Image: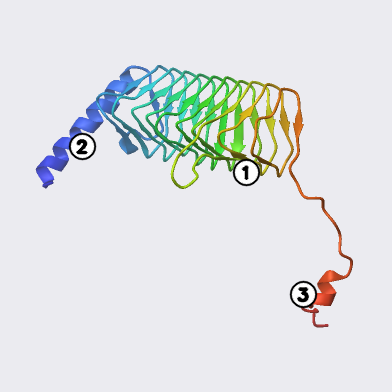
Amino acid sequence: MNLQEYEAMEKKRMEINLRHLENGVRFIDMRAAYIDESVTIGVGTVIYPCVVLEGDVTIGENCVIGQNSRIVDSFVGSGTEVQSSVILESRIGERTKVGPFAYLRPGSKIGNECKVGDFVEVKNSSMGDGAKASHLTYIGDSDVGKNVNLGCGVVFVNYDGSQKYRSTVKDGAFIGCNSNLVSPVVVEEGAYVAAGSTVTHDIPGGALYVARSKGKVLEGWVEKRGILKKKKK
C-alpha cells in the first residue's frame, strides 16, 4: 500500500465514523475506531478506542463496546456491554455482559441478561437467558439452559482426540467450580454438580452429583519428607 492509498483509506474510515456520530453513536476517540461500511450501530452506543468492527455486524442501542474489542460478522443486542473481548460469527442478546478478555468463537448464541466473564471461551454453543459463566470457563459444543450458573474453572470436555461430542445443561442447574463435563452428558433441570467433580454420565433433575476421592490428613508429612527448608534465624 502506498501513501496515496493509505490516505484514501483513512479518509473513508473517518467518513464512516462521522456518519455513525451523526446518527447518535458516541465515540471516546473517533480517530481510533475501525468500522467497516457494512456495520450498523444503534443510537446511544458508546465506542471506546481501538475497537474493530468487521463484516456483517449489527450492534443495538445503548451498548458499550469497550477498548480493544474485535467483533466480526455478529449481532449484539441493545444494552449489552462488551469489554476487551473477541466475538466471531456469534449472536448476543440484550443487557448481557461480555468480558473482559472473553472469546466467543463461531456459532455461539448468548441470551439476554447473561454473563460471559473474564477468560471465558464459548465455541459453537448456546447459553439461555440469565445464564452465567463469570470466569475461567470453557463451553464447547454444548447447550446451556436458562439461569444456569457455571462456576470458575468449569470445562466441557468435548473432544476425545478423534471426535467432538455435545452436552446439555438444562434450566436452573448449578455446576460447581473446577468441574469437568465429559461429553456427551445431560444435566437435567435444577441439578447440582459439586465443585471438583468429573461428570461422566447423565444427572437427573434436582439431584446432587459428587465425584471426589475422600480427603485425608497425614500429620507431620511435610517435615518427614524434608520438603520445606527451615528459615534462617
Circle 3: is it few (<14), some (14-19), or many (20+) Cα within 10 Å? few
Circle 1: is it few (<14), some (14-19), or many (20+) Cα within 10 Å? many
Which numbered disc, 2 or 1, marks the residue that appears first in the sequence? 2
Q: Could you tell me residue 51's position as x and y percent?
A: 37, 36
Q: Could you tell me residue 14's position as x and y percent?
A: 25, 31
Q: Could you tell me residue 229's position as x and y percent?
A: 77, 78
Displayed quadrant of residue 135: top right
Between circles 2 and 1, the one closer to the viewer is 1
Q: How far apart are marks 3 and 2 (CA)?
A: 61 Å
Given residues 38 and 14, the one toward you in this image is: 38
> Quadrant where the C terminus lies?
bottom right
The reply to whether callout 3 and callout 1 are in contact (CB within 8 Å) is no
Given residues 131 and 24, the one toward you in this image is: 131
Q: Distance between the residues labelled 3 and 1?
A: 29 Å
Circle 2: is it few (<14), some (14-19), or many (20+) Cα within 10 Å? some
Q: Which amino acid does label 1 sit on?
A: Gly
Displayed quadrant of residue 137: top right
- Give the SS element for disc 3: loop
Which numbered disc, 3 or 2, marks the residue that appears first in the sequence? 2
Q: Name the residue under label 1.
A: 153
- Relative to 210, 9 lies left or right: left
Q: Name the residue under label 2.
A: 10
Q: Which amino acid does label 3 sit on?
A: Leu
Q: Which residue is drawn at 54% across and 29% down?
A: 97
Q: Mark 3 points at which residue?
A: 228
The label shown at residue 15 is none
Q: What residue type is labelled 2?
A: Glu
Q: Residue at x 37, y 18 (%)?
A: 24
Rendered position, 221 above or below 36: below
